[in-house]
Image (cartoon, rainbow, N blue to C red):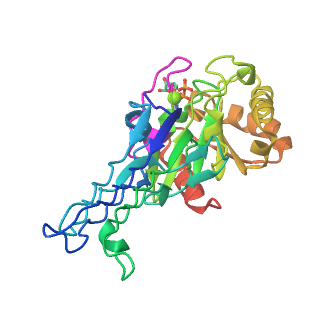
Amino acid sequence: MLVTEGKVKFKAGDGGDGKVSFYKNRKGPDGGNGGNGGSIYVTGTSDIYALSNLFKKTEIEAENGQPGMSSKKAGKLADDMEVKVPFGTVITDKTSGETFDITEKDDRVLLCRGGEGGKGNWEYRSSKNTTPMYAEKGLKGQKRDLHINLKLIADVGLIGLPNAGKSSLLKELTNASPKIGNYPFTTLEPNLGELGGKIIADIPGLIKGASEGKGLGIKFLKHVERVSVLFHCLSCELKDPEKSYKQIRNELKEYNPKLLKIPEIILLTKTDLVSEEEVKSVLEVLKKLKKKILPVSIHDWDSLEKLKILISKSSV
Ligand SMILES: Nc1nc2c(ncn2[C@@H]2O[C@H](COP(=O)(O)OP(=O)(O)OP(=O)(O)O)[C@@H](O)[C@H]2O)c(=O)[nH]1
Ligand SMILES: [Mg+2]
């Protein structure tokens, strides 16, 4: 299952305490410094399922540094921790409101800094005080209470009513192998595929009332927010394609009016199911929407080639 949202606490490791100790003959201090605690870094990955691993725990802790030792030996430095999140993940510190946006694969952010190790009493020696009886405590590692939200970043988003043929197109165009079925809501979570370096996201079907929770609701629309071009799939089988088109646009608006500003191309799908005349008459009706429209069918190689060219040229 694609997990896209959750809460988790991060805690970097504490620094080890400095040591108070003296050479055996008490000629002077020899307490070593504590080791630094481990920091927590977050790195972007293309594995969109990475968050389900992360949310298995409610708290993620990096190791503490080890305390200093006698003979001026420093405590061991703790290893830093690397946490992988899918690119497109927005991390918000619930206390400070600070946000961290992991927008690309291999983006790396220091989220929680490990505490510095404390100085041992050897560091405090001076001509005035040759036997310092104190050492510094290690500093605490940084803690954060986080909200983590994945909003997929794709170049192209395939949207539309259930059964419009979105997943079939993703399958034809890319290496992805989404489930396809002749019933609504076959796709229950977004599928991603790649074509010529562009990421295409197949978003679960939307219906009228989705913004009020109908069908699968609008929980997937957050993934549309960061798509560069929307391909709105409208099936030739629809009785009133214009009405269906407007309904989906309305759901997008209800969710976030900014979604209407994303460049949009209409794909008139399943053209093989109707006559050429019918395709022409639907195109005539849709003309007034003043959008670019491409008729396609998964059984029409030429139309798929045109679609590939359109994707490669789309302004992303
Ligand atoms: N004849 C024909 N059938 C198609 C075409 N594209 C898709 N189909 C069929 O239409 C049905 C629905 O296709 P899907 O790709 O699963 O549709 P979807 O838009 O992903 O549907 P949801 O996941 O439910 O939103 C399947 O039975 C497909 O085989 C097409 O171009 N021509
Ligand atoms: Mg589907």
Q: Which percent across, then down, holds residue 267? A: 64, 41
- Whether residue 148 is visible, yes or no, is no
Q: Outermost residue toward the right?
A: 288
Quadrant of the image occupied by residue 47: top left
Residue 8 forms part of the magenta stretch: no
Q: What stretch is highlighted in magenta?
A: 170-188
**Magenta: main secondary structure:** loop
Seen in the image, is 104 located left or right of residue 160?
left
**If the image is split into quadrants, where does the C terminus sit?**
bottom right
Q: Which percent across, then down, holds residue 24? A: 13, 66
Q: Which percent across, then down, holds residue 244? A: 75, 26
Q: Which percent across, then down, holds residue 59? A: 43, 35
Counting labels gives 0
Of residues 260 and 169, which is closer to you in this image? 260
**If the image is split into quadrants, where does the N terminus sit?**
top left
Residue 186 forms part of the magenta stretch: yes
Q: Which residue corresponds to the image point at 20% horizontal and 74% vertical from the top-left? A: 27
- Whether residue 103 is visible, yes or no, is yes
Quadrant of the image occupied by residue 220: top right
Seen in the image, is 149 located left or right of residue 287?
left
Q: Which residue corresponds to the image point at 63% horizontal and 49% vertical from the top-left? A: 227
Q: Outermost residue toward the left?
A: 24
Of residues 32 and 174, which is closer to you in this image? 32
Seen in the image, is 298 located left or right of residue 314?
left
Of residues 283 and 138, which is closer to you in this image? 138
